[in-house]
Image (cartoon, coloured by chain):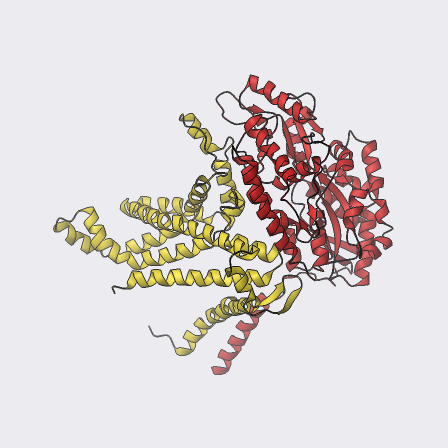
Amino acid sequence: MKKKFFLAMLLMIAMILSACGGGGGSGSSGQTADGKIVIKYINGFTGGDGDFMKKITDGFNESQDKYVVEESQEKDHYTKFKTGNYDLVVIHTDLLDTYRQDKMIQDISGVMETAGLSPEDFHPVGKDYVSFDDGVFAVPLDIHPMTMFFNKKLSPEAPATYDDLKTLSATLQQEDPNMFATGIPSAGLGEWFIMTMASQNGINLVEGNHMNFSQEKLADALMTYNDMIFKDKISPPGLGLDGEFQAFMKQVDEGNSSMQTATALTGPWYYGAVKETYGDDLGIASVPQLGTQPGVYGAGHTLALPASVQDDEKKAGIAEFLKYMYTPENLLNWADSGQAPTHLATMELVEQEAEKYPLSAQNIKQFESFKGAPKLYQYREQVRYVVENIYPKVVGEEGMTKEALMAELESATDQAKQVAETAPQ
Amino acid sequence: MRISRTWSITLFLPFLICFILFLVLPLLYGLYISMHSWSVFGGNGGFVGLDNYTAILTPGNIYSNAFYLGLKNTLIFVAISVIPLVIISLGLALLVDSIPDKLKVYFRTIFFISYAVSVTAVSAIFKWLFTGNGGYVNNVLNTMGFSSINWLNEQPYAWVAILIATIWWTIGFNMILFINALDEVDQTMYEAASLDGANWWKKFSYITFPSIKGVFVFLTIVSVIASFNLYGQTLLITAGGPTQSTQSLIMIIQQMVFTQNNLGVGSAMAIVMGLIMVIIVATQYFYSFRNE
């Protein structure tokens, strides 16, 4: 009896322990049953663009008898990447320096060379992001700047300046007081609105290894958004998270108190949704100039090689995949999703067929005035206080004063300095 | 029926093993990590003693600012949510208990079904309901002649929206436990009380509540713990806003670990949060049963 009991216990413990372990699927040295080398590729393309990336990976897999790309599209792919085991990862341009300094990714130039790629094959906005003193840490994929969608029925021409927006709003409000030229959201794209305004006013926010927000010029520039809402009535007040997009998609009907806007300054990932709603009435243009000079902020995607990938066979497979992906005819799939590739040869094709790839072609035009996130350790954490605390006050508080704003900007700079100091030595 | 010692151990052991594997060991490991400089990706960077605790508890640095902000927001939610979560579920249980048996099953199901919905779906529904610009609730208010409320971008409305979402989502669980407790109350006591001329309130105060007090205390404690773990609703409905006022402690810990890559500080925050919960729950327990 005792023997049986202990055997049963052992079996139970073994089952529990086996249930706890594993779960990683095919690891970094994984192979399929038919002997193909598995490349585990993770990205965050869970929106409409995911299908277009899938077309690229499916196309590669069909063309291959040696390698297979297992693509995971995850909402929070960074968490999965940090706790999992992957061979290729999509990283946003603003995070590259952090991932490099934390040694989560490695120099990819050898793999690029095998794939027949060089940083010179990319537009400077893409190339500069991935190039560091100690190597090339990713392959540029796209730049997604802030974009303007406009409703041609309400605004036949794209407004290009602050005054254009003011005039448009006044005209629309004569028809209906719930209609506005554009929408300033209180959260979601806050960072993009702040940085676009800084860029359009020629403000350099980087000081050494941290962001310096305590600048009178920045306070003045940010107050423009307060004026747009409370003084010039260009945007309705109180638009919440992603309010710029929500207000653009609303329809003002009789008896309906919804606020509708004629334009949306937003991210290109909404392209599918706005295209479906507006069809031929959808206009796409560069963001208007709200400051003293042209400028636009945004982000970009890059493909990085995790530090854990050391196997030469695996690296050869990744190179093969990159070679396939960066063949212009294949990368055009990415332009089809609305994203603007920074690969020069693909850009050329997009520009030639601008009518087929309207958003991508329009955003390529914005590359010249594009100014993305600076290369700083934990940049997202450095801007968190400004984005989550200060920006909502700027766009939410009528009567916000520059003095109050300056005091907050000083706190933000102090926090950014402390975050910068956490960088690995 | 007597169960042999061998069988009782056999039945108990899986729970003991799981308890050790999934609670005791992670807790000890978390305690160990909290005393080290530890990155999610890079691993152990060396022993730092109580430095992580000092950093989060000494005011004036990024870690303590984040910790105290998250703790304050979480305590606000605990304070505003526990009483409605317990009282409303008790009220619903009393209502359901008083209806004919044939109908009980339908109402139990109706109130409990929301508990089976995922937090993602619940948040999507309530975000749509409470959206300031043309949301359902504001449209109803407008129809009734009231002006719109900026539910998700202004306090205290943001807390109200999260509270309503949480109550709708979780009330079914508490209600079912109360209904089960009410079923156990000895009906002859009500008959005796009726003969003595006791009204509804007296029956509740002297018979019902004392009989279900154990469940009441249990649910109060469970609600405190659940409210401390506020995460999904604030992340998905308000994204921690307006101006970081609904950023819960769990959200802060998640940011610390997965965004700032600082598992050491994140673990120290989690340990301190656990200690605070233990103190609150122990105090509650002590005061609830001090007269017995």
Where residue A409 appears, x then y in whole percent? Answer: 59, 44
Q: Image height check: is A207 above or below B1? A: above
Q: Position of residue B121 (x, y in %)?
A: 51, 44
Q: Nearer the viewer, residue A111 or B19?
A: A111
Please name the residue shown 83% across and 36% down the image. A349
Q: Taking the image as drawn, is residue B78 in sight?
A: yes
Q: Is residue B50 above or below residue B107?
A: below
Q: Colour of chain A?
A: red
Q: Is residue A392 visible?
A: no
Left or right: A68 in relation to A282: right
Q: Residue furthest bottom?
A: A2
Q: Quadrant of the C terminus of chain A?
A: bottom right
Q: Nearer the viewer, residue A91 or B33?
A: B33
Residue B57 image offset from top left, x and y in percent: 50, 60
Which residue in the rendered view is the most extreme toward the left?
A: B196
The color chain B is rendered in = yellow
Left/right of residue A285 with respect to residue A13 in the rendered view: right
